[in-house]
């Protein structure tokens, strides 16, 4: 059976005041207008300064582009009426998490109670890509293999170098915050969907969690949809970069499925080794390369991207996403958002010699990038 490999993209945005560039709570009137236009494709997030959108089920990135552009444009237009703007970066450059309040909603009130201090620091945003895969056992089989490529996706996606006004030295600080939660990180290797369900049920029976939606691995079988959900990526300031990452996830899923139907598979490495590449991606982004465990060498990201594009050619042609997947070259050439944010800070600091002004310039840069492809 050929899975449909449909895709859906979820993105979380931060809302900022257009004058101060500081975070701002989403006004009720703004959320009401967004829901009136986008219905269930928009929702509040854990913090009041966040908003989440999700595309419809799409056959490929061409369909996803139209829907994601509509979603981003609508949120932006509704926010502008309140002198606000959305930014798609995984951390706000200078905001303090202590100043934020969580959304007064039963789900989020329970999270705040259950997770205590660690969840209060969750001033982070991510991008999730769902790929439709049946049957469920195939989902788990591909989860085991696709885990190898999670550091590649993370390296390209990094958009969170700053935290509370400080350059962290990391390209993705978001995971440093997120990994403090339970049930996060790389997924464990599982032999079947039944094993996944039994493991989750142990925690459900103990009333530790209500269901598998409280499993927050970097890659997981979705609780709500018949999909494999990639959760590793920082959210992307540029719409086209988000589509490139989604296209790569979709094509990787089909490439691994093609191996499976030939009774082949991608080599599965221990989580300990993949975690080292995950850390390298988090720390260095696209600068320092990742470990090729077969060769026993650290390979530059430029070489890895070229290998990935070649590996996915057949699948990119199948989904008519060759241009989007080859867009990974452009992402490499311009650097990740983390690098572009640092450049915006450096340019502003050189011009004004004022660190606070330079931090606000980074937010203005993120607003510009959000709107560049709309």
Image (cartoon, grey):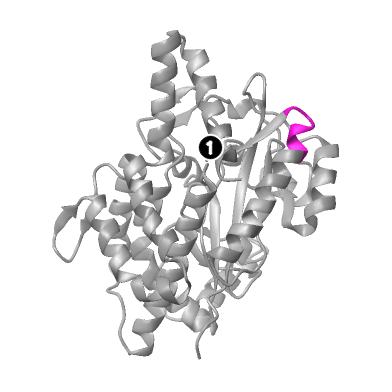
- The image quadrant of residue 328 is bottom left
Quick one: quadrant of the C terminus? top right
Q: Residue at x 33, y 64 (%)?
A: 148
Q: Along the line of sight, which residue is nearer the eye, 206 or 225?
A: 225
| Rendering coords of residue 276 (x, y %) | 28, 52
For disc 1, the marked residue is 369
Residue at the far top in the pictured view:
353
| Rendering coords of residue 197 (x, y %) | 56, 76
Compared to residue 193, the image places residue 209 above or below, namely above
Q: Residue at x 42, y 8 (%)?
A: 353
Compared to residue 365, the image places residue 51 above or below, namely below
> Residue 160 vs residue 263: left or right?
right
The reply to whether residue 122 is in sight is: no
| Rendering coords of residue 112 (x, y %) | 68, 43
Q: Along the line of sight, which residue is nearer the eye, 155 or 373?
A: 373
Q: How many labels sit on residues?
A: 1
Residue 136: in magenta span: no
Instruction: Magenta stretch: give its range.
Output: 78-83
> Residue 335 vs residue 71: left or right?
left
Q: Residue at x 41, y 74 (%)?
A: 317
Q: Along the line of sight, which residue is nearer the eye, 194 or 172?
A: 172
């Amino acid at each position: 059976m050929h899975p449909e490999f449909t895709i859906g993209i979820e993105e979380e945005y931060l809302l900022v005041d257009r004058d101060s560039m500081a975070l701002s709570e989403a006004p009720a009137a703004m959320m009401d207008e967004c829901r009136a236009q986008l219905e269930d494709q928009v929702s509040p997030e854990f913090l009041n300064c966040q908003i989440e959108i999700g595309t419809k089920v799409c056959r490929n990135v061409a369909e996803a582009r139209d829907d994601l552009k509509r979603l981003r444009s609508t949120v932006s237009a509704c926010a502008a009426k309140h002198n606000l703007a959305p930014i798609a970066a995984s951390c706000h450059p200078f905001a303090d998490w202590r100043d934020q309040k969580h959304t007064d909603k039963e789900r989020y009130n329970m999270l705040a109670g259950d997770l205590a201090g660690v969840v209060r620091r969750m001033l982070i945003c991510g991008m999730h890509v769902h790929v439709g895969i049946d049957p469920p056992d195939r989902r788990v089989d591909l989860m085991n293999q696709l885990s190898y490529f999670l550091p590649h996706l993370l390296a390209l996606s990094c958009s969170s170098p700053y935290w509370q006004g400080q350059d962290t030295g990391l390209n993705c600080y978001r995971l440093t915050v997120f990994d403090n939660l339970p049930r996060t990180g790389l997924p464990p290797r599982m032999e079947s969907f039944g094993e996944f369900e039994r493991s989750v049920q142990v925690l459900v029976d103990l009333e530790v969690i209500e269901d598998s939606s409280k499993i927050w691995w970097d890659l997981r079988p979705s609780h709500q949809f018949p999909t494999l959900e990639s959760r590793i990526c920082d959210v992307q300031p540029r719409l086209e970069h988000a589509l490139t990452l989604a296209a790569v996830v979709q094509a990787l899923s089909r490439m691994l499925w093609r191996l499976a139907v030939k009774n082949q598979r991608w080599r599965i490495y221990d989580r300990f080794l993949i975690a080292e590449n995950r850390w390298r991606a988090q720390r260095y982004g696209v600068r320092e390369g990742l470990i090729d465990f077969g060769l026993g060498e650290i390979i530059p990201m430029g070489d890895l991207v070229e290998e990935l594009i070649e590996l996915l050619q057949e699948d990119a042609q199948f989904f008519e996403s060759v241009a989007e997947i080859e867009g990974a070259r452009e992402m490499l050439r311009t650097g990740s958002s983390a690098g572009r944010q640092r450049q915006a800070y450096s340019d502003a600091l050189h011009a004004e010699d004022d660190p606070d002004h330079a931090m606000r310039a980074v937010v203005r840069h993120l607003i510009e990038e959000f709107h560049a492809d709309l």
